[in-house]
Image (cartoon, rainbow, N blue to C red):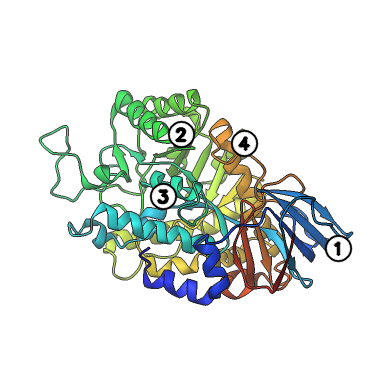
Amino acid sequence: MFHSRAVRRALFILGCMAAQAVHAQGPQPTAVVVENVRIFDGTSARLSAPSNVLVVGNVIQAISTDPIADPTGASVIRIQGGGRTVMPGLIDNHVHIFMSASRQEDMLDPKTTPEILQSRAAEEATLMLLRGFTSARDMGGPVFDFKRSIDQGKTVGPRIYPSGAMVSQTSGHGDSRLPSERSRRFFGVASKGECLGVNFIADGRDEVLTATRENLRFGASQIKVMAGGGAASAYDPLDETQYTLDEMLAAVQAADDWGTYVTVHAYTPKAVRRAVEAGIKCIEHGQLLDEPTMKLLAKKGIWLSLQALDEAPESQAADVKAKKHTVVEGTDNAFKWARKHKVKLAWGTDFMFAPANNKNQNADILKLKQWLTSFETLKLVTHDNAQLLALSGPRNPYPGKLGVVREGALADLLLVDGNPLENIQLIADPARNFVVIMKDGKIYKNTVRQGTSQ
Ligand SMILES: [Zn+2]
C-alpha cells in the first residue's frame, strides 16, 4: 500500500504495535476492558471515580467501579488505564476531506489524476483518525468511495457523514470554474469540479432537485447547499444571497422526502433568513449574523455549525483576503450571541487546500477558549457535535449513540494521558497524549502495555 511521507511519519511515531493495528493486521479482540480510568463522559463537567470500561463488539457494554470479569467465550484485551482519562472520540462537523488533502493548484493540474487525489484523501482520513477524530461530517466533496472502504475495514479512517457534491447556483460559492470557462448550458462543458464530484452547478428547481437526489442516490447523509457569498471563491461577493426561495425549497423537499436535511453555507442575515424560511435545519458559518437572526435560529431550533476561522494566507488574492478578514472579524459576535441565546451550536474546522496545516486540526479546538470553558469545549466537540450528526435520522450511516461514554453507546474512545478538563492543551498533541484510539470497538492505536486473556 502506498503511503505519503506524512502517513509514514505517523505510523513511525505510533510504533510497531499501532502500525499493525492501522493496517488491521492480526485478529481484533472481541472484547476490550480498559481498567482503572476516570471518565469524561461527554456531558458531565467532572471526571468519574476510578472505573473500568467493557467494550464488546462495537458497543460499550458496561462501566463499573467494580472489577469487570472477562465475558465468557470472548477473547479479551485488557488495557491498564493507570488512572488516565477515557473520553469520547473527537468529532469535526465541517470537513472537506477530499479538498483538504491537496493544494488547489494540484487539483487543477491535469497531471494530478482523480485516482491520485482520491488516494491522498484516503490517507488524510487515516491521519484524521490517528488524531483522535472518530467521526467527521464532510461538507462537500467526493468521499463516497473511501467512506465505503473505511466502513468495510479496508481503509483506516473516521466515520464519515458525507454530503457529496456541494450544490451551488451558477456564480455561487460552489462555482469553481476558471474565469475563462463558460456555463455548460451556454456553449461550455461540465467543469472539472463537477466532473470530480466536488460540486454541482445547478440552477432552477429541476436542476436543484436532480443534484440533491443524485447526492442522495450515492448515500449522502445530508445535503450541502450554498446559500450565500463565500470568502475563498472568486466571483461571489460576501453579501450576496444565493438561490431563490423556490430553488432552496426544492432541495429541502427532496432531502426531507429522503428522510434527511439540508445545511447551508451562509454568513449574512438575508441569506440565513431565506434558507430558514425554506426549511433548512443547519447553518454552516454564520459569522456575519446580527443578533435578531441569531435569536431566530434559537427560536426555530436551527443548528449553527461555527468555526474559528483564520485569516486568508498572504499568498491569496487581495479581495479574497479582504473577504476572509470580514468573516474572521464577525466570529466573536457569532460565538457570543450563539451562547447568549442558546443556539444549538456545533463546531468544525473547514480546512481546505493546505495539506500541511491538517495536523493543526486538534489545536484548532483550543481557539474556542476565547468563548467557552474547557468543559464546554470538550462537550461541544463530542456530545454536542454528535447531536448534529444524529440529525440525519433514518439516513444516519452509523445509528447508535456517539459522542458519549455511556453503557450502550458506540465504542469510539480515546485514552488520554492526563485530565483534559484540567488541561485542555493535552488534546492538541494527539500523537503524544492519546495513548489509545478506538473506533467502533476496534483499536487503531495502543501504546499502553497490555495483557491478553482468553
Ligand atoms: Zn466548508
> How far is mark 4 from mark 1, CA to CA?
35 Å
> How far is mark 2 from mark 3, CA to CA?
31 Å
Name the element at disc 2: helix
**Which of the numbered marks, if any, corresponds to residue 49?**
1
Q: Of the residues tagged 4 and 1, which is closer to the observer?
A: 1
- Circle 3: residue type: Phe
Is residue 323 among the parts visible in the rendering? Answer: no
267 vs 374, left or right, is: left
Q: Which mark sits nearer the N-terminus, 2 or 3?
A: 3
Residue at the (50%, 29%) spot, across then down: 279
**Which of the numbered marks, if any, corresponds to residue 301?**
4
Asked where in the image residue 4 lies, by quadrant, the reply is bottom left
Name the element at disc 1: loop
**What residue did someone put label 3 on?**
146
Q: Which mark sits nearer the N-terminus, 2 or 4?
A: 2
Residue 284 locus on image (x, y percent): 48, 46
**What residue did someone put label 2 on?**
275
> How far is mark 1 from mark 3, CA to CA?
39 Å
Along the line of sight, the residue nearer the viewer: 424 or 124: 124
> How far is mark 2 from mark 4, CA to CA?
14 Å
Q: Which mark sits nearer the N-terminus, 4 or 3?
A: 3
Residue at the (44%, 48%) spot, across then down: 149
